[in-house]
Amino acid sequence: MMMQVAEVNGEDVVCLVKNSVTLSGLLYTLHVSQIHINLPTLTDKDKEVISSWGVQNNIDILSLSYTRHAEDVRHVPDSLFLMHFFHGLTYFDEILQEADGVILSRGNLVIDLPPEKVFLFQKTVVFKCNMAGKPAVVTRVVDSMTENLRPTRAEATDVANAILDGNFQFEKLPAVTFVAWSNAILLGAETLRGLHLVETISIVGRICAEVIFLNYSSIFP
């Protein structure tokens, strides 16, 4: 649901809904484009849970949502930087140095970036992760399978492109072509509340396998 602020009265904000939408489920998240939030990424309670419950249960990886600065991940070992809003874009290079990898959550990026810019940003992020030797994980690939048995044609292609995320050729190295690979696909609503969990995992897995094991030299000599 896209909303535009029409009026502000004290602590009340009146918004104009810009599109038709059906609200379903029990939990909603609100994302406001390019707004700085002065709240810590990790609260004291979060740190307590990590040091107690997390250690006791041998948690391997922590995913930090709404990461804004490198300081957010500097003191959290084995963390994946979950990037999905404006401040994460601005300080990406510094955050990548501290994080163990990146989860590229593209849902909110479409709000912070013009739609025509999302593909280039995704390819750049994956490439930088590859060059840093850190995993890049892509999300939001087959949303329609939350209700449908098959992905759309665009989604099936998106899964493949997320794994083999295009060729990069830079002016400084004109003779070298870089191939940027995503390391994993992370499913969300499709398996959280979707109607076709097994089929979703199976189809996404088959697409990934086709991309990885295809003999490209025989097709593109």
Image: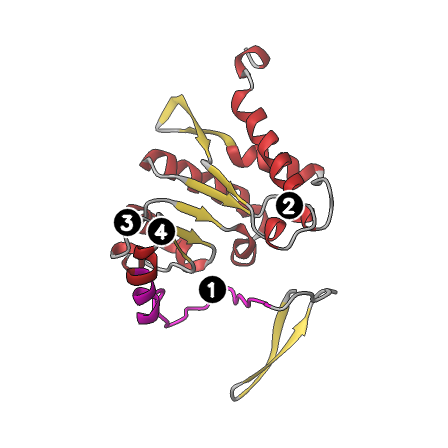
Q: Secondary structure at mark 1?
A: loop
- Measure how far apart labels 3 and 1 are at the Cα level: 23 Å
- Asked if residue 147 is among those painted magenta in the image, a careful observer would answer no
Residue 203, compared with residue 218, is above or below; it is: below
Which badge, 3 or 2, is on the more N-terminal residue?
3
Is 116 placed left or right of 52 in the picture? right
Viewer-proximal residue among 92 and 99:
99
Q: Is 40 placed left or right of 161 in the picture? A: left
- Give the image quarter of residue 42: bottom left
Query: What residue do we see at 51% from left, 33% from top?
Result: 163
Q: Mark 3: which secondary structure?
A: helix
Q: Residues within 10 Å of mark 3 (few under 14, many from 20)?
A: many
- Residue where numbered disc 1 is placed: 34
What residue is disc 3 on?
Answer: 98
Q: Kindly report the distance in space between the C-alpha atoms of the residues bearing marks 4 and 3.
A: 19 Å
Q: Earlier in the sequence, mark 1 or mark 2?
A: 1
Q: Which part of the image, by quadrant, shows the C terminus?
A: top right
| Picture residue at 37% right of the left edge, 60% below the top | 68
Mark 4 or 1, nearer chain start = 1
Amino acid marked by disc 2: Leu
- Mark 2 — residue? 197
Residue 46 lies in quadrant:
bottom left
The residue carrying pointer 4 sits among few (fewer than 14), some (14 to 19) or many (20 or more) residues within 10 Å by Cα, namely few
Amino acid residing under circle 3:
Glu
Magenta residues, as a range?
Answer: 27-50
Q: Identify residue for label 4.
A: 59
Query: Of tags 4 and 1, which is closer to the observer?
Result: 4
Residue at 57 percent across and 48 percent down: it is: 140
Q: What amino acid is found at the position of numbered circle 1 in the picture?
A: Gln
- What secondary structure is marked by label 4? loop
| Labelled pair 1, 2 in contact (Cβ < 8 Å) | no
Q: Nearer the viewer, mark 3 or mark 2?
A: 2
